[in-house]
Image (tube, helix red, strand yellow):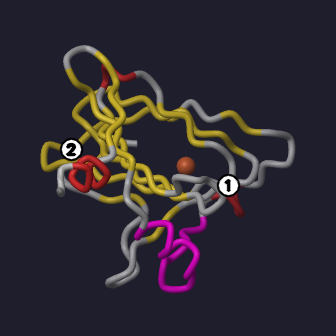
Amino acid sequence: MIHHGAAISPPNDNEFEQYYVHHHQIDHNLVLEGSRTFTLLNPAWDEPHHVIYLNPKMGALQIPIGTYHQSVSGTEGSMVLNQAVRDRDFDPSKEFIPVSLRDRADLRKAKAAEPVYWIWDDGRIRRLKVGRASKANVF
Ligand SMILES: [Fe+2]
């Protein structure tokens, strides 16, 4: 998928963000050009909120089944290749329906959790929890 300039997938539902979730597809998103910020929400995870600043050097981001996801391009746009793996029950009419946070208290709670950030830094992928670091510095 190509974003020409700043764009968000899926688009917002007025003031509420929307997310995709798959039931029979595992995404593997590889940025070919530019950068794309992915937000993942999964209420079943101990850390239900992840933000990945994905660039071409980081390889493909795998998004497990049942994980809600959206992505945003910077102003320069981006090109992303998704090498999706689908099982035999995959039905395209059911896999790409945006889910609005308007209707989902569980996802709003996941989004409110302190995010885990994944960034490219000095040749490697780093995992950061900014909130925890700042709390540790409060004496
Ligand atoms: Fe997806």
Task: Name the secondary structure under disc 2.
Answer: strand
Most foreground residue, 128 or 66: 128
Q: Which residue is mark 1?
A: 66
* Nearer mark to the viewer, of 1 and 2: 1
**Amino acid marked by disc 2:** Gly
The answer to whether 53 appears left or right of 49 in the picture is left
Which quadrant does the C terminus fall into? bottom left
Residue extending furthest toward the right: 88
Task: Name the secondary structure under disc 1.
Answer: loop
The answer to whether 123 appears left or right of 97 in the picture is left
Whether disc 2's CB lies below 8 Å from ligand 1 is answered: no
The region drawn magenta spans 97-112
Q: Residues within 10 Å of mark 2 (few under 14, many from 20)?
A: some
User: Is residue 85 highlighted in magenta?
Assistant: no
Residue 30 rendering spot, x and y as whole percentages: 43, 29
Residue 106 rendering spot, x and y as whole percentages: 58, 75
User: Compared with residue 95, is residue 32 higher up or lower down, i.e. above or below?
Assistant: above
